[in-house]
Image (cartoon, rainbow, N blue to C red):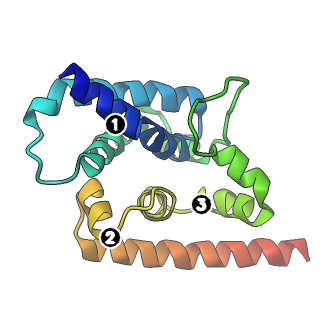
Amino acid sequence: MDSVFDRLYKEYQQDVFQFLIYMVKNKDTAEDLLQEVFIKVMNSYHRFEGKSSEKTWLFSIAKNVTIDYFRKQKTIRKRVMDHFDWGEREISGQEPLPEEIAEQSEQVKKLYTCLDYCTTDQKMVIITRYIQDLNISETAEVLGWSEGKVKTTQHRAIKKLKELMSDEEEEVQ
């Protein structure tokens, strides 16, 4: 189990961490939730049946850990709307952090701000589809939804983001 766990951790920890940080927008909380995800992986890998890929299985666990976290908060909306809290520590990994991505492009920064105004479902779909680069069926598997629901939620999220982005551009002018 140690070698399997080590492999899973090395292969997927950065992707899972990025998913968590996009969801909770707090580095310390994301690190705590990442730890919780991999504890659950270690405790339940013997029940993994291989019906899905390990990646989608890990994202399903991360999604459930995130939902549990939000449920524990007094106000879900407040937690979703909080701004990124990066602190001073660096995270190892080759993938750029959300903050680095946002600094590269003002448009991307606006997108991340607008993402805060989407529903939690819309946010999860956008993150899994476009940030984590999962396809429709993998996203449906991770979220425990039908592919139709993923497509509908994705469509609504993109429509809302376009509206929010254009509203923001109009405010600047």
Q: How far is disc 1 from disc 2 in space, using C-alphas?
A: 21 Å
Q: How far is disc 2 from disc 3 in space, using C-alphas?
A: 19 Å
Residue 39's spot in the image, x, y percent? 29, 23
Residue 125's spot in the image, x, y percent? 42, 62
- Determine whether, in the image, residue 86 is placed left or right of residue 21: right
Question: Which type of secondary structure does the marked residue at label 2 adopt?
Answer: helix
User: Between 71 and 14, which is closer to the camera in this rendering?
Assistant: 14
Question: Which type of secondary structure does the marked residue at label 1 adopt?
Answer: helix
Q: Amino acid at mark 2?
A: Ile
CB atoms of marks 1 and 2 within 8 Å: no
Q: Earlier in the sequence, mark 2 or mark 3?
A: 3
Dot 2 corresponds to which residue? 136
Question: Which type of secondary structure does the marked residue at label 3 adopt?
Answer: helix
Q: Amino acid at mark 1?
A: Val
Dot 3 corresponds to which residue? 115
The residue lying furthest to the top in this view is 2
Residue at figure coordinates x 24%, y 24% from the top left: 3
Say which of marks 2 and 3 sits in front: 2
